[in-house]
């Protein structure tokens, strides 16, 4: 059964994952496919501001 045929969550395999198109972002965890949508611009802006604030305090990660 290929990735394009519907399976129940928990039944997907690594083979199914590798058969997905490259333009779709998914994670496979314990047979469940999780849609990994790209972060929104607001999310990226907030993450950047946090990184700048941490850098300004002298903290290194």
Image (tube, rainbow, N blue to C red):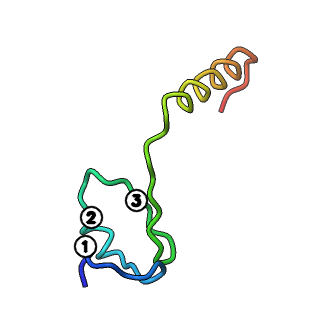
Label 1 environment density (alpha carbons within 10 Å; few <14, some 14–19, many ≥20): few
The label on residue 51 is none
* Residue in the image at 49% along x and 35% along y: 40
* Residue in the image at 33% along x and 78% along y: 6
Label 2 environment density (alpha carbons within 10 Å; few <14, some 14–19, many ≥20): some
The CA distance from mark 2 to mark 3 is 9 Å
The label on residue 20 is 2
| Residue 46, image x, y percentages | 61, 26
> In the picture provided, is 2 more to the left or to the right than 39?
left
The CA distance from mark 1 to mark 2 is 8 Å
The quarter of the picture where the C terminus appears is top right
- Pointer 3: what residue? 26
Q: Secondary structure at mark 3?
A: strand
| Residue 59, image x, y percentages | 73, 25
Label 3 environment density (alpha carbons within 10 Å; few <14, some 14–19, many ≥20): some
- Pointer 1: what residue? 4
Q: Foreground: 38 or 53?
A: 38
Q: In which quadrant of the rendered view does residue 55 lie?
A: top right
Q: Foreground: 13 or 24?
A: 24
Q: Do the residues under discs 2 and 3 have CB atoms within 8 angstroms?
A: yes
Label 3 or label 1, whichever comes before in sequence order: 1
* Residue in the image at 44% along x and 62% along y: 27
Seen as rendered, the residue at the extreme front is 6
């Amino acid at each position: 059964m290929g990735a394009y045929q519907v399976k129940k969550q928990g039944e997907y395999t690594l083979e199914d994952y590798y058969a997905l198109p490259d333009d779709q972002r998914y994670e496979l965890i314990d047979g469940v496919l999780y849609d990994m949508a790209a972060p929104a611009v607001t999310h990226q802006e907030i993450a950047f501001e946090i990184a700048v604030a941490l850098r300004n305090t002298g903290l290194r990660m």
